[in-house]
Image (cartoon, rainbow, N blue to C red):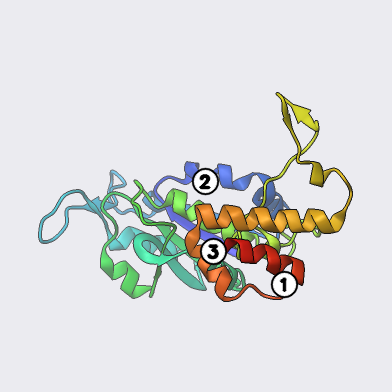
């Protein structure tokens, strides 16, 4: 999968090229193409913005440097603009984007970009949450990471995206590792007794508890469609309704 990123700050994308996504890039599963919009400015000072028509604070990124950035690199596929007014990123959106051969992500800055850029390239606006950041670079990295995990070959074979927290419908249960006791805190006994059925039920109940307390919206959705539960799981679920 090819992911193109248009930005004024290409150096910000070094962290995303590490860890799991970094290994996918090394293997050629993900191609990350980062373009500095300033390199396509016709201004002698590499200026890419100007004041807004109609007045208002801040500066607006201009059409021409962005258009030149796209056309000089022969980008194809779907165009995305990271924007607080966009549709919120979720599992279905990330999975859908992962099935495309190529996407191009525009990172805005200052007070945003000229609306005509979005119209020319029919850009889909996407947000990662109901808050405003100083630029689109951090949201773009979140999008790249979320989408990449759905691309075949990115995750190790023993990991499944569908079983992860949120995607399963419930938040993830608490996790522990060695040592069994540290700072007078012990691992729950049920996780150490080898009874896989009791361990499964404990994990299910903890996920229910955390979801109801921390994300009641997800909990209510889970109640509407809990999937196939056995009688023991149904008994546990009944405690939290």
Whether label 3 touches label 2, CB < 8 Å: no
In the image, 216 versus 240, the foreground residue is 240
Give the number of the disc on residue 163.
none
Q: Position of residue 126 (x, y in %)?
A: 42, 64
Between discs 3 and 2, the one toward the N terminus: 2
User: Pointer 1: what residue?
Assistant: 229
Q: Is residue 128 left or right of residue 162?
A: left
**Secondary structure category for the residue under label 1:** loop
Q: Residues within 10 Å of mark 3 (few under 14, many from 20)?
A: many
Q: Residue at x 20, y 48 (%)?
A: 58
Q: Residue at x 36, y 48 (%)?
A: 133
Q: Quadrant of residue 151?
A: bottom right
Give the number of the disc on residue 219.
3
From where the camera sits, is residue 32 visible?
A: no
Q: Residue at x 80, y 33 (%)?
A: 180
User: Pointer 2: what residue?
Assistant: 13
Q: Residues within 10 Å of mark 2 (few under 14, many from 20)?
A: some
Q: Residue at x 52, y 46 (%)?
A: 13
């Amino acid at each position: 999968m090819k992911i193109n990123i248009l930005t004024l700050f290409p150096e910000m994308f070094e962290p995303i090229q590490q860890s799991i996504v970094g290994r996918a890039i090394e293997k050629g599963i993900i191609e990350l193409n980062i373009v500095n919009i300033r390199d396509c400015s016709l201004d002698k000072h590499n200026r890419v913005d100007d004041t807004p028509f109609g007045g208002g604070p801040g500066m607006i990124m201009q059409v021409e440097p962005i258009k030149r950035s796209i056309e000089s690199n022969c980008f194809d596929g779907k165009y995305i603009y990271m924007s607080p007014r966009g549709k919120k990123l979720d599992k279905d959106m990330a999975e859908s984007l992962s099935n495309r051969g190529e996407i191009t992500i525009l990172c805005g800055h200052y007070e945003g970009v000229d609306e005509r850029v979005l119209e020319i390239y029919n850009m889909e606006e996407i947000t990662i949450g109901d808050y405003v950041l100083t630029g689109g670079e951090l949201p773009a990295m979140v999008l790249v990471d979320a989408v990449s995990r759905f691309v075949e070959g990115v995750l190790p074979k023993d990991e499944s995206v569908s079983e992860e927290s949120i995607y399963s419908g419930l938040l993830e249960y608490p996790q522990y590792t060695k040592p069994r006791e540290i700072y007078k805190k012990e691992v729950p006994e049920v996780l150490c007794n080898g009874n896989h059925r009791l361990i499964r039920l404990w994990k299910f109940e903890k996920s229910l508890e955390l979801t109801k307390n921390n994300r009641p919206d997800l909990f209510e959705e889970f109640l509407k469609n809990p999937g196939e539960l056995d009688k023991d799981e149904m008994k546990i679920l009944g405690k939290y309704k």
